[in-house]
Amino acid sequence: MKKKVLLAVAMVCLVAFVGTAYAVTYITIVSGGLGGTYYPLGGILAEVYNKAGIDVKATSRATSASRENCRLVASGRAQVGMSMGSTLYQAYTGTEAFEEDGALPLRILMHMYPAPHHIVTVKGTGITKFEDILGKRVSVGAPGGGDQVLTNMILDAAGINPEKDIKRQQLTQPEGVMALKDGNVDVVFWNFATPGSAVLEVAAVREIVLIPIPEDVVERVVKKYPFMFPYKIPKGTYPKQDKDVLTVADGNFLIVNKDLDEDLAYKLVKTTIEHREEIMQSVPQATHFVPEEASVAIIPVHPGAARYFKEHGIEVPVE
């Protein structure tokens, strides 16, 4: 009799254990390549989710970043991904690079951090305002790169023909750094999160000047390209920067499939924001992980994430 009781208790415990095991949700986070911000962020997010007590077992996977991540999340081969706003908007609308894919079933989990456009020159070029770039040696970014795509949007909104109105150069970010240092280019257009290491590298040897984009140009960019938004690079971000600098920014987002479980989406965004300080130790850009900034949306937000933002008095678009 005693053995039967012990066996029954053991069976109950086993059932409870199995039930608990099956309650765990396994997720894959797709990030980016080595050297960027996405890759380390994916790793730390997986660590945070795994120890947060939210019944999630997460792993992070390196990818080629935004385009691949959108397709992986849409297909269900990954549950959480990272994407630039410009790429996410194309994936959601089935345009540009995603024309053959068609509109993908993606939603925003949260906005991570902005990537403002930097227009950088140095003392001695005579460039102090946006229109001063006319006739100057201007690097618009490497051919086919994100810097150049976004730069062309800005120049188009300003009515500037890059082939006629400026002495166009097409430099990678490292090439642009060297050219500014050596005086072989007058101004460069770069897109990255602040503080940008390229700007800091130039500032270590030359006195830099950040050029603001005129308000009317910002308005035209944002109106034509819904994934862009106005942004001010805060004063003090770079050496001798004594005032905010108006520009436009592309965002960086955590994305999920529209069919992701609502409670899971809620727990993921809540956990991410509540562990902001821990994440910042590995990825400084996590300083932006606060409800006010995390709720920036360029496409609909997942209902689970929207519930979290509503608890903080923030309404976001939900489809």
Image (spheres, grey):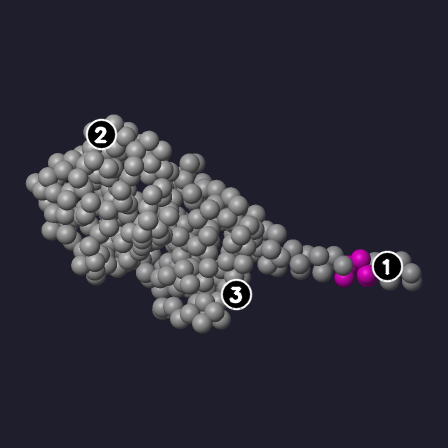
On the image, the x and y values in percent for residue 245 come to 29, 51
Q: Residue 263 shows which numbered tag? A: 3
On the image, the x and y values in percent for residue 23 come to 61, 59
Q: Residue visible at 8% across and 40% down?
A: 164
Q: Residue visible at 24% across and 54% down?
A: 95
Disc 1 residue type (three-letter): Leu
Nearer to us in this view, 158 or 48: 158
> In the rendered view, would you say 200 is above or below 226?
above
SS under mark 1: helix
- Cα distance, mark 2 to mark 1? 83 Å
Residue 23 in magenta stretch? no
On the image, the x and y values in percent for residue 213 come to 22, 52
- Write the start and end of the magenta stretch as one range: 8-12
Is residue 132 among what the camera can see?
yes
- Cα distance, mark 3 to mark 1? 37 Å
Q: Which comes before the other along the chain, label 2 or label 1?
A: 1
Q: Which comes before the other along the chain, label 3 or label 1?
A: 1
